[in-house]
Amino acid sequence: MTKATFNTIIHAPNRLQICALLETTKEVEFKLVKEQLDVSDSVLSKHLKVLEGANYIRLIKKTEFTRQRTWLSLTSLGREAFKSHLRELKRIVG
Amino acid sequence: MNNEKETINKEEAAATLKSLASFKRDATKSFRMPLLLIMLISLSYSLIIFSYGMSEHGNMWGLGALIGGAAFFIFVAFYVYTFRLLGIKPSFFPKGKKRIINELVLAVIFGVIIIAGREFRLLGFEFSPHIAALIAGGLLAYLLYKYPTGEYMTMEKKND
């Protein structure tokens, strides 16, 4: 288990929720994440770009039944960073 | 990210954890499969266990186990397919030590129920397959309903 660290990239409320959502599943579609977070496409894209830049999430674009779908998944680095951030929050609370 | 705080105080951390738990609870509810599908999966699973418990060389209960297995596979495949259309790919393999332990414990519990259901009948307790099927089906339905993502969630306290 790595040391609990406060992660400023993950801590932003929407990004924290994105990580929480992706943690419980293998992959979730962009549209569903948008609905769950109740944000616009542009806002979600901005947050995803930050997480993808940190290599915390993976974006996979696939065409299924002639429909373009974007699937999001948490990388192992992202999973560990999210868990580490949660541990730090719990440590602060005491 | 220069404008983002490097740390937070106790109250902020507690509020963050609380709102995150609430968000996850709501998200988990939306990942829950329909009750009818939960019932069908649990019933087909019960049929496998009951048939296995009752099967002998001279009867047809082995066929019941096969039918139960096929039905179970079809219903689970249907669940995966519909959830994929909705935008969710469920995770079948546990990630993280805690989840692996939880799922191993569950595998042992289900394994014990299956074996006990049959062995007790062979020892003379006639209704043990019925009881084993009831327990296993009920437990599976409860787990599918309560923990659709396989993740253990602490329930919200009434005073929170």
Image (spheres, helix red, strand yellow):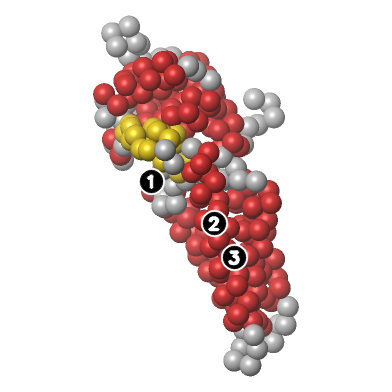
Q: For residue B1, which numbered disc appears in the image?
A: none
Secondary structure under tag 2 reads helix
Residue A17: x and y in percent read 46, 26
Residue A65: x and y in percent read 44, 41
- Residue topped by disc 3: B71
* Quadrant in which the N terminus of chain A appears: top left
Tell me the distance, in whole angstroms, between the alpha carbons under discs 2 and 1: 24 Å
Secondary structure under tag 1 reads loop
Label 1, residues with CA under 10 Å away: few <14, some 14-19, many ≥20 = few
**Residue plotted at (61% across, 88% down):** B56
Q: For residue B76, which numbered disc appears in the image?
A: 2
Secondary structure under tag 3 reads helix
Residue B23: x and y in percent read 55, 27
Residue farthest to the bottom?
B58
Residue B134: x and y in percent read 69, 66
> Label 2 is found on which chain of the structure?
B
- Residues at marks 2 and 1 on the same chain: yes
- Residue topped by disc 1: B96
**Residue plotted at (41% across, 15% down):** A42
Residue farthest to the right?
B127
Tell me the distance, in whole angstroms, between the alpha carbons under discs 3 and 1: 31 Å
User: In which quadrant of the rendered view does residue A83 lie?
Assistant: top left
> Label 3 is found on which chain of the structure?
B
Q: Amino acid at mark 3?
A: Ala
